[in-house]
Image (cartoon, coloured by chain):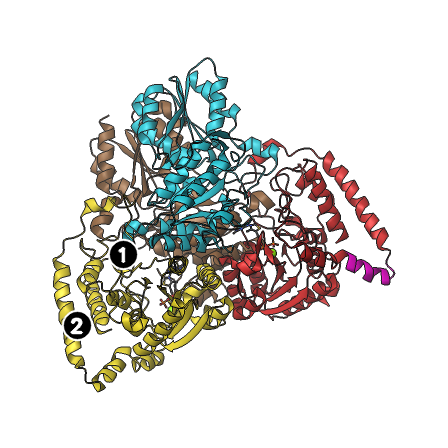
Chain colours: A cyan, B brown, C red, D yellow
Amino acid sequence: MELTYLEAISDGLRVALREDERVLLLGEDIGAFGGAFKVTAGLAEEFGSNRVIDTPISEEAIIGGAVGAAIVGMRPVCEMQFADFVSCCFDQLVNVAGKLHYRVGLAAPIVVRLPSGGGVAGGPYHSQNPEAWFMHAPGLKVVAPSNAADAKGLLLAAIADPNPVIFLEHKYLYRRIRGEVPEGHYETPLCARTVRGGDDLVVIAYGAMVHAALEAAEAIEEASIRVLDLRALVPLDERAILDCVHDCSKVVIVDEANYTCAAGAQVASLIAQYGYEDLDGPVVRVATPDVPIPFAPSLEAAVLPGVDRIRDACRELLAY
Amino acid sequence: MELTYLEAISDGLRVALREDERVLLLGEDIGAFGGAFKVTAGLAEEFGSNRVIDTPISEEAIIGGAVGAAIVGMRPVCEMQFADFVSCCFDQLVNVAGKLHYRVGLAAPIVVRLPSGGGVAGGPYHSQNPEAWFMHAPGLKVVAPSNAADAKGLLLAAIADPNPVIFLEHKYLYRRIRGEVPEGHYETPLCARTVRGGDDLVVIAYGAMVHAALEAAEAIEEASIRVLDLRALVPLDERAILDCVHDCSKVVIVDEANYTCAAGAQVASLIAQYGYEDLDGPVVRVATPDVPIPFAPSLEAAVLPGVDRIRDACRELLAY
Amino acid sequence: MVLTRAIEERGLSLYKQGRVPGSFYDGRGQEATAVGATFALGAADPVCPLIRDLGAHVVKGTPAAAILGHYLGRASGVSHGREGNVHFGDATRGVVGMVSMLPGMMPVAVGMAWAFKLRGERRCALSFFGDGATSVGDWHEAMNLAGLQRVPAIFVLEHNGYAYSTPSARQFVVDPLERAAVYGIAAATVDGNDVEAVFDAVRLARERALDGGGPTLIAAQTMRMHGHGAHDDASYVPAEQLELWAARDPIARQRERLAQLGVDVDAVEAGARAEVDAATQEALAMPAADPASALTGVFCEGEPQLLGSGAAPWSGFAAA
Amino acid sequence: MVLTRAIEERGLSLYKQGRVPGSFYDGRGQEATAVGATFALGAADPVCPLIRDLGAHVVKGTPAAAILGHYLGRASGVSHGREGNVHFGDATRGVVGMVSMLPGMMPVAVGMAWAFKLRGERRCALSFFGDGATSVGDWHEAMNLAGLQRVPAIFVLEHNGYAYSTPSARQFVVDPLERAAVYGIAAATVDGNDVEAVFDAVRLARERALDGGGPTLIAAQTMRMHGHGAHDDASYVPAEQLELWAARDPIARQRERLAQLGVDVDAVEAGARAEVDAATQEALAMPAADPASALTGVFCEGEPQLLGSGAAPWSGFAAA
Ligand SMILES: Cc1ncc(C[n+]2csc(CCOP(=O)(O)OP(=O)(O)O)c2C)c(N)n1
Ligand SMILES: Cc1ncc(C[n+]2csc(CCOP(=O)(O)OP(=O)(O)O)c2C)c(N)n1
Ligand SMILES: [Mg+2]
Ligand SMILES: [Mg+2]
């Protein structure tokens, strides 16, 4: 069936709720209202308010409560109304959920859905990409789908995973991206995927930036450009990354997140250490500079990595 | 005067309280008790409980309160009892303090002291190195002194800075490191410093790892090894880092923090992009693997980067 | 109130014309609370308005054109395009503004008031917050600290019975008004749609605060007459309830009062309309925010600008 | 209680001999609260002990040798060297343990109880917390959510009048006991040094919880007879106060009661001493934690192990 990215996530939640009674949705306004983005629309009606639960505005208690329910056998899926609010439950995520299995041997299978990213004139508090914070917190898995099929498949994989999983769903893609999505249950493995073939240069990206990377690649007829969609940030598919570097020897890494200590910094450091001999040119990064995401479209466009910046970075590197 | 790293910080606080009535200390048990590590011992007696204030256990309110006091003219210096608790006020730091100047044009000159780091059998909750989280949060400065003189000088610079500054003071160094510390007021610039000369290979480190790096360098007679102490992580002294790579062409980067998306990942990505042509060998990283810091000395020693791992990494790279 | 509503009506129509980027939120029906409360403040008393409190900005003196230009993301809007919709402050006028994370400015207001108390200044700080926001940990920490330190703060609870789509019944079981007592904080309830009643309640709270009587929580009973934002039709609110409150429209009520006092309210309204018309032209004529400005101002350089003073037409009376 | 104290005394002496790494915390004088409360639980009722609650672990059945081995950081200590001092749980016995961030397990306990309620199981969850921890936002969010959802949870407040060095008077102005009402939570106060009184209070609270009556907060009035940790001489506590409470030692009091009932308490104590002596030998004979194990178990692979059931010698009675 053809679904939007958003519909694919909703379908994934519905499938999980239908097939596994341990699955439980927690969040603000996710019940009858269907959530700020309507991702959970209709679910409360179908599964009842005991499985699709409106919570008070209490992010710490949502995550802590989910962890508690998880260690006694539930599979809670929590929604942050915007990814930005995840900083309000940072402690429960990094110190309780992330460390529980290592410390006590108790698995905390929770999923935390984060409507993230910019490009929607959301301003400093409705545009953030917090993934790197969680990549730097042992015990949390982090996934970031770029298309409808992966969104559903990675969500079902996240719910099935016995560990806490941070699920980044990109607001910009919600209704702009649609694609063929398999019916029923299937799980997308937490590994990278080559979304465009090529061997002169590889662009490594995830989430919304995959689409910018593809556009940039299309714009460059003179060379054959590969695009790697990471899909998962923890675990990071190091093998796939290094294989691309081996094949292409030129690499551009794209982050929508702020530049310093972003996912791309980790990917670049990995390549600089383990892919060094395959390199033919500097490891180029394109990212949002270290500024809050401004509201005005004229300003936001000036900070988010666009097709042009990626294309120019590729051209420059190809000429190296 | 010769002081320990801890005494140097106490002296810095005393100097600031004496010379600037806007300075205010906030924290748990920092008053009569002098703080969990006795850094503020004697200060409540000298300056009174209106300037050295015991707060309830309320990290969010401590930071939010400090921001409020700062925007109306105070210079609050907050103490987290352990750096680990900073995750409890993560939201106020990244969303309120860090973004205020960009959004509203209001400066929030606060300093947040974080007794951080491992090596003291503190276990998962008393050993963390959270700096990278804040490097990835625009608007916050981050400093991490490695010796007594810098500890005092960077603290006074942080208090004088009109921006929020995360001040990482390493618990392991508190009483183990001592050195000559100038009397009275002086400020150490937020830039890197070469602490050991050499031109075959440079080890880049900060905080406690600077000492491990120096020991490792000493152990290698056969080559001349430079050691660069970053001192500040935001702003990052990119010029100094690239100059070292230019001079030495081989580089080992050390993090005590967890490997993924650590400060060292940013430094490595910087070098891989802008120092590529100066490189003669892979950009090598030595860091704590992505695990919580275990309690038992036998386990902690197995995860923290020690002198041996750094020395071996250098030897291997020198042989490249 | 009239001006406030006129500005929001204009902002909403500009939004529906697609000229206001992002989303749009207003405080229709709650104007009396924001306006009445802010009128009772002195010029030097800072305020932290929330989503429904455009009136606070207006009373503090931010010009209509600066607000409309802000909605439009223009260069000379009050936030210079960095912020949008209700997310803005006006540093020069004592308006700290809000952060999206609720109720993130409560601790900040406590901090400002704390500084005033420590310095012996006869000033107070006022923070608005919604009923739903009382479920967040920050609210508790701020209330506890404020009661403990007896800071000169005024907390205005905008009790409209809903948090987005979630009714109070699913936010808490005991009214926040009753919670004030457990923090040792004085409490009063007031008709939030009666601008004079709100004014008087805040005036008394301010006197208490300035006389060292500590903080006061004022619960303003009101109703959000629009959805949470322009995208929300609020169909979850019973029609009867809205009719009931429509009859209690704060402006209509004040209109009668003033008419009896012989005030030519039509002239006032005509004046407001004219002002907004002119401001709209001015705002639409403003250039878009300059892309180059997106990268500046993350950090403060030089001496920080402290929070300024706003207009306080009635403050003499308030101080009386 | 006797066994609990014997284990802690032994732990402390091993610490003073320098054989226990890191720091050491005990619950001297508060044994009756942890032991009495946990005795009243059923085997399937999970517990979240805190710093002063070794007794809860002992009652749930974690062997003395596993605890002492844990203090020592040995391979077969209950945490296998990953955790130290009071930071540990026992997944197989329904003991979730604590996190350092106070009161981080409150929301987790609420989540467990919530799951029990949703699944219609006759179980409850118990979380201990200190008076100082009530100032933290997590406490508020957990209490609010628990009252709202009427979950079968029991919150035991260990009211010892101090948070580390800070007396209650500088933590809050209204006793947390009185705060229960504003969350719609039943409250009871009890002599925390009377093990039978604590037992009865928790037994009643458990019955209420299992009968759908919702959560209960039990304030156990007690006194921390040692410093916060072995490093703290607690000189900030008035000597008279300690003398007063020494006379109310929970073990001495229970001793008399039992003696009157004809129990040979000397034999019990001798038994405990013997058990601890044997356990000490066993623990000291355990090998240090294996360095190789430091890197495993960050993530759960395969089916997660759910929280197990502990010993509940009196649970039949508790259920009666
Ligand atoms: C910490 C946090 N979580 C979630 C949100 C998303 N959100 C924005 S407004 C809102 C409802 C607020 O209700 P209330 O506090 O009653 O204010 P009102 O809109 O009724 O004035 C929510 C949940 C937020 N802003 N902050
Ligand atoms: C969020 C947080 N901040 C600070 C600390 C440091 N700390 C450890 S114990 C303690 C005092 C706790 O007092 P209380 O809750 O009364 O427990 P008690 O030790 O009296 O049993 C503090 C501040 C912490 N553990 N967690
Ligand atoms: Mg409301
Ligand atoms: Mg206590």
Find the magenta span and give its range: C252-263
* Picture disc at residue D91: 1
Q: Which sits in the foreground, C296 or C207?
A: C207
The x, y position of residue C265, in whole percent, is 84, 55
In the rendered structure, which amino acid carries the disc numbered 2?
Answer: Ala
Q: Earlier in the sequence, mark 1 or mark 2?
A: 1
Decide: is B122 above or below B45. Answer: above
> Is residue C255 a member of the stretch shown in magenta?
yes
Q: Is residue D145 left or right of residue C108?
A: left
**Can the viewer see residue B159?**
no
Magenta stretch, main secondary structure, is helix
Decide: is C52 above or below B45. Answer: above
Which residue is at the far top? A222
The x, y position of residue D67, in whole percent, is 21, 61
> Is residue D242 a member of the stretch shown in magenta?
no
Q: Looking at mark 1, is its residue's CB closer than 8 Å to ligand 2?
A: no
In the rendered structure, which amino acid carries the disc numbered 1?
Answer: Ala
Q: Quadrant of residue D261?
A: bottom left
Decide: is C69 above or below C291. Answer: below
Residue corresponding to mark 2: D272
Quadrant of the snapshot with the N terminus of chain D: bottom left
Badge 1 local density, few (<14 within 10 Å), some, or many (20+)? many
Quadrant of the snapshot with the C terminus of chain D: bottom left
